[in-house]
Image (cartoon, rainbow, N blue to C red):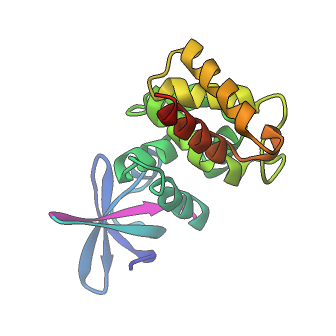
């Protein structure tokens, strides 16, 4: 894996640059901030992630390892590929994006091109616990129901059906729902919904 690259810039393109390293030119997809502030001949160091597909190999480069690592973590979310992950990091700094996800700010994510309601909800559902600056496990007592309702409606449930399913789940729980992770509550609710049909 190519995790870091240093060299002289040979070309500056609209969404990428070509970096000369030991006689080879590597095309690296970068943020507009980088293409607008660099020129041919500049020396540059980037933290990179190599994305291998059946028909292509693509390098994505960032100014620091935090951005590169977050780019890779975002792709662990179901349905999120490098294009969407890169778009998020072109819009927000790593710190901003982690705060947005940790606080459950779905509307902020939806402002990014290529991010709809379902994708934004999925990102928060799967990564929120990792970046939540409050409790490291579980959810705050005042927000777990809202988060669970949002997750269900993003999956096609009406608000009424979502609330009914949540009530059914509460009856079957042996623990305080606020002590459980949202992902676990969602799994239990979906399972209960399937069993009741």
Quick one: which residue is furthest to the top in this view? 160
Q: Which residues are magenta?
A: 55-64
Vertical relation: 63 (above or below) 192: below
Residue at 84% from the left image edge and 46% from the top image edge: 134
Vertical relation: 49 (above or below) 159: below
Which quadrant is the C terminus positioned in? top left
Q: Position of residue 91 (x, y in %)?
A: 51, 39
Q: Is residue 139 found left or right of 126 in the rendered image?
A: right
Quick one: which residue is furthest to the bottom in this view? 22
Residue 108 visible:
no
Q: Is residue 80 found left or right of 151 in the rendered image?
A: left
Q: Position of residue 59 (x, y in %)?
A: 33, 65
Is 69 one of the magenta-colored residues? no
Which quadrant is the N terminus positioned in? bottom left
* Nearer-the-camera pick, 64 or 23: 64
Main secondary structure of the magenta stretch: strand
Q: Position of residue 165 (x, y in %)?
A: 60, 25
Residue 156 visible:
yes
Q: Position of residue 74 (x, y in %)?
A: 50, 53
Residue at 56% from the left image edge and 31% from the top image edge: 151
Q: Is residue 81 found left or right of 175 in the rendered image?
A: left
Residue 121, picture quadrant: top right
Residue 118, picture quadrant: top left
Residue at 25% from the left image edge and 84% from the top image edge: 23
* Nearer-the-camera pick, 64 or 176: 176
Residue at 62% from the left image edge and 19% from the top image edge: 164
Quick one: which residue is furthest to the left in this view? 55
Is 59 one of the magenta-colored residues? yes
């Amino acid at each position: 894996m190519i995790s870091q690259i240093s060299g002289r810039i040979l070309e500056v393109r609209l969404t990428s640059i070509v970096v000369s390293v030991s006689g080879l030119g590597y095309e690296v997809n970068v943020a507009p901030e980088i293409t607008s502030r660099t020129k041919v001949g500049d020396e540059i160091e980037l933290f990179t992630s190599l994305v291998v597909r059946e028909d292509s190999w693509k390098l994505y480069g960032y100014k620091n390892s935090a951005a590169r690592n977050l780019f890779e973590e975002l792709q662990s979310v179901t349905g999120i590929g490098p294009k969407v992950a890169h778009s998020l990091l072109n819009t927000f700094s790593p710190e901003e994006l982690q705060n947005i996800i940790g606080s459950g700010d779905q509307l902020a994510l939806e402002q990014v091109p290529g991010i709809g309601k379902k994708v934004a909800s999925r990102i928060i559902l799967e990564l929120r616990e990792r970046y939540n600056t409050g409790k490291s496990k579980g959810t705050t007592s005042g927000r777990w129901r809202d988060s669970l309702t949002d997750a269900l409606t993003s999956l096609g449930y009406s608000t009424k059906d979502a609330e009914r399913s949540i009530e059914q789940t509460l009856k079957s729980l042996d623990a305080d729902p606020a002590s459980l992770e949202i992902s676990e509550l969602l799994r239990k609710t979906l399972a209960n919904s399937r069993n009741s049909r």
